[in-house]
Image (cartoon, helix red, strand yellow):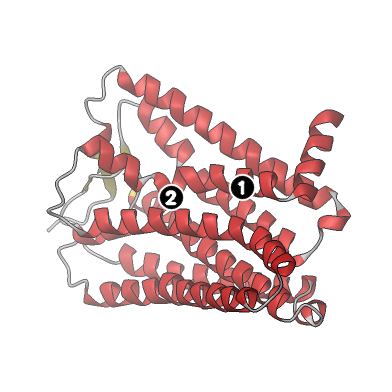
Amino acid sequence: MENKTYFHFMLFENLGHIKYALFTLGFVLYCVIIILNALIILAIYLERTLHQPMYILISCMSINSVYGTAAFFPRVLSDLLSDTHTIATEACLIQGFVIYSYLANEFATLMLMAFDRFVAISKPLQYHNIINLRVITVLIFIHWTFQMLCLAIFALLTSRLTMCGNKLWKVYCNNYEIVKLSCANSLIINVWGFFMVIISGVIPLCLILYSYVEILIICQRSSSQFRSKAYQTCIPHIVILVNFSIAIICEITLSRIVNLEMPTGLSVIISLEFLVVPPILNPLVYALNFTDIRKKIICFIKAR
């Protein structure tokens, strides 16, 4: 049994001239992601009236989008133009760590957004005493740090596995695919992976659903004006949550179900949805639905 020191991305083989079209598409998408999220971050940073918990969470989501896509797009774009498609084990583990911490941070941020809206709607008079910049900053730091620490342990456990193969049928480093290449006992890492799914996905999702169910109950008992205002602030978060959840379900399904018959190109597109659509959709949804952000972005663009 040989302990491999690199992995080979098999899906980049024999692409022919289509790789140049894919490179162009990927480059354009990456530029759009950077520009849209940078506008959101700058708008919230430069406008003092937007230094509020809800907007800080929106900026954190944009920062996380830039962070997560930075681990994917530069690497995949270079692979499209390269004749060799290998990646060192250490670099592969780092890429997987960044991508999965992006996912965990996204769910944590969505959970804090749901909690913020729940407090704002259920306890409007006490809102500023419960949720303020200091509280939301501490919560973000705790959640993001905890998620990254757990994922660092997962990456460390993966690095200690003995590999019997080095062919990855993905366009990025997927930890589950790496574990499947191991010929050592992977019970501990599988248990830890299950634990990560629970704390990073299941628990935040349950808390998010609980918050929005409570909000819905409160709205049904309130006036139409109150209900309309509540829905206006919650619907953008719900749209983003639904899209992100569907993307994650698709990725998990494609990774875990071995016998799922699907064209390779289609499976790649579906598996990459969580890295492409949310980073583009999120800033568009917030810019279109929040007037303060939209006005600041327009002013910022005109000033240039």
Write down the residue under mark 1.
285
Residue shown at the point (82%, 80%) measured from the top left: 125
The answer to whether residue 204 is left or right of residue 289 is: left
The answer to whether residue 303 is left or right of residue 205 is: right
Residue shown at the point (22%, 38%) measured from the top left: 264
Residue 261 visible in the shown view: yes
Name the foreground residue: 260 vs 134: 260
| CB contact under 8 Å: marks 2 and 1 | no
> Which type of secondary structure does the marked residue at label 2 adopt?
helix
Q: Which amino acid type corresponds to the residue marked 2 in the rendered image?
A: Phe
Count of numbered tags: 2
Write down the residue under mark 2.
274
Q: Residue 207 carries which label?
A: none
**Residue 54: percent from left, percent from top:** 72, 63
> Which type of secondary structure does the marked residue at label 1 adopt?
helix
Image quarter (top left, top right, bottom left or bottom right) of the C terminus: top right
Name the foreground residue: 147 vs 60: 60
Considering only vertical position in the picture, is 47 above or below 223?
above
